[in-house]
Image (spheres, rainbow, N blue to C red):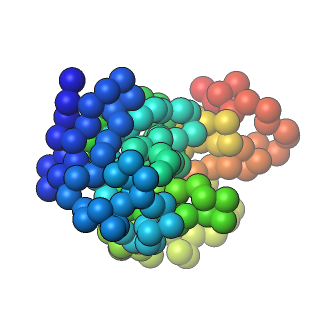
Amino acid sequence: ETARHPGRGLACGGGRARCAQLARPAEERGRGGRICIEDLKAGQELNGIVSSVAPFGVFVDVGADRDGMVHVSKVTNGYVGEIENHVEPGQAVKVWVIDVSGDGKLNLSMVNDDEDYHRRHSRDYASFENISPDVWLDGTVQDISDFGIFVTVAPPDGEKKLQGLVHISQIQDEYVADAAEVLE
């Protein structure tokens, strides 16, 4: 079974969706037609194939010496509860290079950092700025995680609701080992 990547000249086939980048000149490729990981630059956009999925992230074959990893926080804008609901092995994805670490690990993002930055900083938090820490707001629990709960809440003036995280240490005064146990 073979899948083709649009616009990048990648042909994939085989059990693990191995990719060979055909569009790049030979001098820009590493051994076996693969891209040398050292040649990748931060911000570079690549197409790849999801080779495996783990609770902490996604491994993507972009045609380099080794697969890169997309941390779960960089799979999509917003919270990822079950990563399997967002990606699956063999899926074609667009990724951006975050960096190549000193030990040669390729860190990737499925979220364009420029778009993500503007999305995160374009939210209007002004309605929440002057609320006293003593004021309690009603919210709706959207998801529960090991480290806290994600809640959707509207400011007192009724403006647009926003989602936020209530860290597990802020759920109640007593120690909370499991957020799900103390929530209704």
Q: Answer with left or right where residue 144 lies relative to residue 79.
A: right
x and y, in percent, of residue 48 in the image:
32, 47
x and y, in percent, of residue 182 in the image:
70, 29
x and y, in percent, of residue 172 in the image:
76, 43
Front residue (pair 6, 116): 6
Q: Answer with left or right where residue 94 lies relative to residue 120.
A: left
Q: Answer with left or right where residue 74 lies relative to residue 179.
A: left
The C terminus lies in quadrant: top right
User: Residue at the location (55% across, 33% down)?
Assistant: 55
x and y, in percent, of residue 95 in the image:
35, 55
User: Residue at the location (47% across, 32% down)?
Assistant: 53
Residue 165 appears in view? yes
User: Residue at the location (14% across, 49% down)?
Assistant: 6
Q: Answer with left or right where residue 28 lies relative to residue 163.
A: left
The image quarter containing residue 120 is bottom left
Residue 140 appears in view? no
User: Residue at the location (47% across, 51% down)?
Assistant: 65
The image quarter containing residue 118 is bottom left
Number of marks: 0
Front residue (pair 180, 96): 96
Front residue (pair 21, 44): 21
